[in-house]
Amino acid sequence: MTELFEFPSEPERPSELADGAIHVPGWLTLEQQAWIVGRFRTWTAGPVPIRAAKVRGHEMSVRTVCLGWHWQPYRYTREATDVNGQRVLPFPDWMVRLGRRALREAGYPDHQVSAYTPDTALANFYDESARMGMHQDRDEQTLAPIVSLSIGDACTFRFGNTEHRNRPYTDLRLRSGDLFVFGGASRLAYHGVTRVHPFTAPDGCGLDGADGRSAGRINITMRMTGLDG
Ligand SMILES: O=C(O)CCC(=O)C(=O)O
Ligand SMILES: [Fe+2]
């Protein structure tokens, strides 16, 4: 035999789906993932507990806890007036640094990296039956890029166009540790999660299933609201 099979597998590289939309597979180490899951558990404990936001009277299947600003359909407030009226946790400095590193490593230019000061994060939890319909992230007053981190079970992420929620779109798998950035010409692209793939979370990522259940998926999106106060 040749040594063909001894070559390490091709390293995973960033790929640009569309102008400004970059997928970086395996961006977070397992240790970083597990650490973030630990932080997530503290956020869900309050003062504003994780909850399913209500859209036109219907609870979303995804549950969300926010940092910095509280998102409710379709606005940001400091107090979670649709939950318990408490003020949300502050946006952590480590996440600003992580957001800048994400932009840099996704290939964004230096001036955009240094100007990037995300002030809100939506931390979503998906159980194996949760989904997120096609939508635009447009409750922010700036068009600064969105930085998205995924941990736990993989999902099928649908990334579409800026005009409407229908084709053309690309379905890709977001796995534990992946980074996805969408800014520039892709900032207002419609996107959603069509399904979660149970039992695909890697050992050591910090999300473990219990009693035969799958681990679920955490997704964190950092954003710059452009809001004062
Ligand atoms: O879970 C994801 O990957 C996307 C989440 C999302 O689009 C959102 O929170 O607005
Ligand atoms: Fe979104």
Image (cartoon, rainbow, N blue to C red):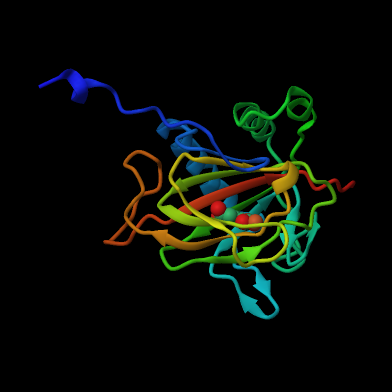
- Residue 188 shown left or right of residue 23 in the figure: right
**Residue at point 17% right, 18% down?**
3
Residue 15, placed above or below residue 220: above
For ligand 1, which image quadrant applies? bottom right
The N terminus: image quadrant: top left
Quadrant of residue 223 within the rendered picture: top right
Q: Residue furthest left?
A: 1
Q: Position of residue 195 (x, y in %)?
A: 45, 63
**Residue 124 visible from this viewpoint:** no
Q: Is residue 200 left or right of residue 179?
A: left
Q: Residue furthest top?
A: 3
Q: Locate residue 168, reporting x and y percent.
A: 59, 60
Q: Position of residue 206 (x, y in %)?
A: 40, 42
Q: What residue do we see at 49% from left, 33% from top?
A: 27
For the image shown, how many numbered marks are present on the structure? 0
Confirm whether residue 223 shows in the render: yes
Identity of the residue furthest to the right in this view = 228
Q: Nearer the viewer, residue 203 or 40?
A: 203
- Horizontal side of residue 76 vs 165, given as left or right: right
- Residue in view at x 69 percent, y 33 percent: 96
Please name the residue shown 81% across and 57% down the image.
Answer: 77
Q: Hey, which residue is sitting farthest bottom in the picture? A: 57
x, y percent for residue 211: 28, 61
